[in-house]
Every structure is written in C-alpha cells, then in structure tokens.
Image (spheres, rainbow, N blue to C red):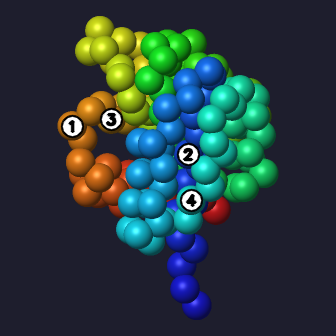
C-alpha cells in the first residue's frame, strides 16, 4: 500500500493575472511527486477555500504580485479557520515586502517565498513541513 501524496492547491487570489510563476511552481511540484490542483487567476478567498476543502488538500500555495497580499492571504487563512480547516498549511509567494512579512506570519501563513527562492528549496520546505492530512 502506497502512502498518499501531498496534495497542493495553487491559487492566484484577486485581480493579479501574472500566472507564469504559479505555472512553473505547479510543474515543479508535480515533478517532485506532489499532487497539484491549480485554480488559475482571479480567485476569491472564498473560491480558494472552497476548492481546498473539496479537493482535500494538505497545503494551499497563494501567489500574489499585485500588492493585495495583505488583504487576500489573511482572508484565506481566516476562512479556513472558520471552516475548522486550520490544519491545511497556507504559504504565500510573490512580491512581498520585508515590512509585510510579520503580518503574513501573524495571519497564519507558515512560509513566504519571495523572488530568489529556488524551486528545490521550496520543494524541500514542503517535504519537511507538510504531511498528508488524515
């Protein structure tokens, strides 16, 4: 019997239409052996959380380049908490200024990856910090 693979939902919340990085991550995650669901661009926090619950994911990866991360990322973690799904790990990535980092962690994100993070380092972080949910 094989172990269940880590399931990751990648999402682009808000009006940010720049999805090349998310698509690169989706491919890298698949190549690393993770199951990946990519929601595409222009997702609301409610849509992201709904998909995360429906797909029974272990982690949600949010990508934002528009500057709206200070609203959108905490909205996702708040909705997951309201759905008693705090065990779904949330990480973020994109153009996140240093002065916003603590607010992201305070909102419940477990990691924030900014430009310069390597695909290998992100995959290694996932392998170390994310376990398939029961």
As measured in the structure, the alpha-carbon distance from the residue carrying label 2 to the one carrying label 4 is 7 Å
Numbered circle sitting on residue 113: 3
Give residue 111's position: percent from left, percent from top: 37, 35
Vertical relation: 56 (above or below) 83: below
Is 99 left or right of 49, judged from the image as shown?
left
**For the residue labelled by badge 1, is the local secondary structure a helix, a strand or a loop?**
loop
Tell me the mark number nearer the camera, choosing from 1 and 3.
1
Numbered circle sitting on residue 10: 2
**Would you call the spot at circle 4 few (<14 residues within 10 Å), some (14-19), or many (20 or more)?**
many
Name the residue that disc number 4 marks: 36
**Would you call the spot at circle 2 few (<14 residues within 10 Å), some (14-19), or many (20 or more)?**
many
Say whether disc 4 or disc 1 marks the residue closer to the N-terminus. Answer: 4
**For the residue labelled by badge 4, is the local secondary structure a helix, a strand or a loop?**
strand
**102 or 13, nearer to the observer:** 13
Write the residue at 70% across / 55% down.
56
**87 or 47, nearer to the observer:** 47
**Would you call the spot at circle 1 few (<14 residues within 10 Å), some (14-19), or many (20 or more)?**
few
Say whether disc 4 or disc 3 marks the residue closer to the N-terminus. Answer: 4
Name the residue that disc number 1 marks: 116
């Amino acid at each position: 019997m094989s172990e269940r693979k880590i399931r990751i939902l990648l999402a682009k919340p808000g009006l940010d239409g720049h999805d090349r990085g998310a698509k690169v991550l989706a491919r890298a995650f698949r190549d690393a052996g993770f199951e990946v669901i990519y929601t595409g661009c222009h997702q609301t926090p409610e849509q992201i959380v709904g998909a995360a619950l429906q797909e029974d994911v272990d982690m949600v990866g949010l990508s934002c380049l528009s500057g709206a991360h200070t609203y959108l990322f905490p909205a996702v973690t708040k909705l997951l908490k309201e759905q008693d799904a705090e065990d779904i790990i949330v990480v973020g990535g994109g153009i996140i200024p240093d002065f916003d980092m603590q607010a992201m962690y305070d909102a419940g994100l477990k990691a924030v990856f900014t430009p310069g993070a390597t695909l290998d380092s992100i995959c290694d972080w996932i392998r170390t910090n994310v376990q398939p949910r029961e």
